[in-house]
């Protein structure tokens, strides 16, 4: 530790220096408050011992100057017998401790160690207060799922998070070219603000906090470019009476975490936009009967849906690294699970695009069941679900192998979701005249009578909050019917579900 000792008595300086050296610390000495202030301003010292009685600038005055200059230091007062009242007064101005002269080696050691521990505790408390601020921001923003509403609320929420009220701006230069602010009334031209910030974006300094000058106003601004289609800046107006150092760390802390939320919601916004296109396409196909349209525009459309998922997946890893020690880690972890759900659903779409030729051939059902189980094995184990094969083995059907596998995977996925921790899934196969029946049976929560007729409808889902798209059973039914088969469902609420696939035997 680097320590400075301030005392106008050279004998005291010599003695204290020798004792501190013997404790293994680096030490320097000065004999005036003015010289001490110059040394401390360099920022190299971590602790300072200050004599309470000195000419020109005494210990109390030096403590005041240290506080005014916001110097990060641990101050300890040296006081003679009879100066106890002055020493107690020094504690009011930031002194961590005081020692009576003549000091001993053991007293110095104990005082240094106690002051270091107190400093660590204070820093920990500051961090906890930052977490409290984060919770304040997060609790207000986390449930806002509409992207535009989120953008409008962010400046207000950050404004409220500061004890000293600032003007907060959220500037979205891509793709919306909009400025959100709080308070809503501005004293200067927002067009000038946007132009100035737009000019500064050419510097490519993402993540750095800059001080910008607009007319006679200073702004702290932090730039983010998390996506090629998204560029935004969070800025705060700095009032003259505020010290930049006092708000800079808090501003950066809030900005970094709010940026994560904006990025996550923007990617969801893009995904929802792509799903809406898919929905409109489906309605067009139904109205016009032009099923070939699905193949004609399928690759372009589904790539538009897949790309946001890939972006979300890559950004999650960056986000998790940034916030691994923060309270919102569990939210990111939950987001990652939702992305897994989406990826599983869109595997179905990928396979569907490969079925423009749709080759039908002899398929061994046992092989398809085995492949489906291997794909879902981890999820089945994670919920402690029993999985059992039942019925006649080595049956063959006329089918497309990939289409049958992906259909079976999504039917089994629905059974997994219907089961609490534990339960059982049975896959049963039997020959019925010219057909083979493949049944997926679970003892889960079952399906309400009023919705059982809707489960094959496009975009119908009871799992929207966990990432369900309502596409799995729809496209499974479409694939099975394309293989000249059919699918039926039996279910009662609380008594489980049976899904039967019928395909022509080979």
Image: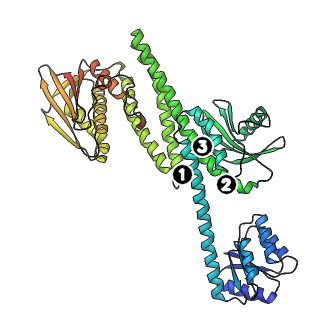
| N-terminal-most mark, 2 or 3 | 2
**Mark 1 lies on residue:** 323
Quadrant (top left, top right, bottom left, bottom right) of the N terminus: bottom right
**How far separated are the C-alphas under marks 2 and 3?**
15 Å
The residue positioned farthest toward the top in the image shown: 288
- Relative placement, left or right, of 372 versus 50 is left
**Mark 2 lies on residue:** 249
The residue located at (76%, 87%) in the rendering is: 80
| N-terminal-most mark, 1 or 2 | 2
Mark 1 or 2: in front is 2
Mark 2 in CB contact with mark 3 (< 8 angstroms): no
**How far separated are the C-alphas under marks 1 and 2?**
16 Å
Q: Quadrant of residue 204?
A: top right
Quadrant (top left, top right, bottom left, bottom right) of the C terminus: top left
Q: Which mark identifies residue 259?
A: 3
| N-terminal-most mark, 3 or 1 | 3
Q: Which mark identifies residue 371?
A: none
Percent across and percent down for residue 64 are: 79, 69
Percent across and percent down for residue 244 are: 75, 54
Local crowd size for mark 1, using a 10 Å CA cut-off: few (<14), some (14–19), many (≥20): some
């Amino acid at each position: 530790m680097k320590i400075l000792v301030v005392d106008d008595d050279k004998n005291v300086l010599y003695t204290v220096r020798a004792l501190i050296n013997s404790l293994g610390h680096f030490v320097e000495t000065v004999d005036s408050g003015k010289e001490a202030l110059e040394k401390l301003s360099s920022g190299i010292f971590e602790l300072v011992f200050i004599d309470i009685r000195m000419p020109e600038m005494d210990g109390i005055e030096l403590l005041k100057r240290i506080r005014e200059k916001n110097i990060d230091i641990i101050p300890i007062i040296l006081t003679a017998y009879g100066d106890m009242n002055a020493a107690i007064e020094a504690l009011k101005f930031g002194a961590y401790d005081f020692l009576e002269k003549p000091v001993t080696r053991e007293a110095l050691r104990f005082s240094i160690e106690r002051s270091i521990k107190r400093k660590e505790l204070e820093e920990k408390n500051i961090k906890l207060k930052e977490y409290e601020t984060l919770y304040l921001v997060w609790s207000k923003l986390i449930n806002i799922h509409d992207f535009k509403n989120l953008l409008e609320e962010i400046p207000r929420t950050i404004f409220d998070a500061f004890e000293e009220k600032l003007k907060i701006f959220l500037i979205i230069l891509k793709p919306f070219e909009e400025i959100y602010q709080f308070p809503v009334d501005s004293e200067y031209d927002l067009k000038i603000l946007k132009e100035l910030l737009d000019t500064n974006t050419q510097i490519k300094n993402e993540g750095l906090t800059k001080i910008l000058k607009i007319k006679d106003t200073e702004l702290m601004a932090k730039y983010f470019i998390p996506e090629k289609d998204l560029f935004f800046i969070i800025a705060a107006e700095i009032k003259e009476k505020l010290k930049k150092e006092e708000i800079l760390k808090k501003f950066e802390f809030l900005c970094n975490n709010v940026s994560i939320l904006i990025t996550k919601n923007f990617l969801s916004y893009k995904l929802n936009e792509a799903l809406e296109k898919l929905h409109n396409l489906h309605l067009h196909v139904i109205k016009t009967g032009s099923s070939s349209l699905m193949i004609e525009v399928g690759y372009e459309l589904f790539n538009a849906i897949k790309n946001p998922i890939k972006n979300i997946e890559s950004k999650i890893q960056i986000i998790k690294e940034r916030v691994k020690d923060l309270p919102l880690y569990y939210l990111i972890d939950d987001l990652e699970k939702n992305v897994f759900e989406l990826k599983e659903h869109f595997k179905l779409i990928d396979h569907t695009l490969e079925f423009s030729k749709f080759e039908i051939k002899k398929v061994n059902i046992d092989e398809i069941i085995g492949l489906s189980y291997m794909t879902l094995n981890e999820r089945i184990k994670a919920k402690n679900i029993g999985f059992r094969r039942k019925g006649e083995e080595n049956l063959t059907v006329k089918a497309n192998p990939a289409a049958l596998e992906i259909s079976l995977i999504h039917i089994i996925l629905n059974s997994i979701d219907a089961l609490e921790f534990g339960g059982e899934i049975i896959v049963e196969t039997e020959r019925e005249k010219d057909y083979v029946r493949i049944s997926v049976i679970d003892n889960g929560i079952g399906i309400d009578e009023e919705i059982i007729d809707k489960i094959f409808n496009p975009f119908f889902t009871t799992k929207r909050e966990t990432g369900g798209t309502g596409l799995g059973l729809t496209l499974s039914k479409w694939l099975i019917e394309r293989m000249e088969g059919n699918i039926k469902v039996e279910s009662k609420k609380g008594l489980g579900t049976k899904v039967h696939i019928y395909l022509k035997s080979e």
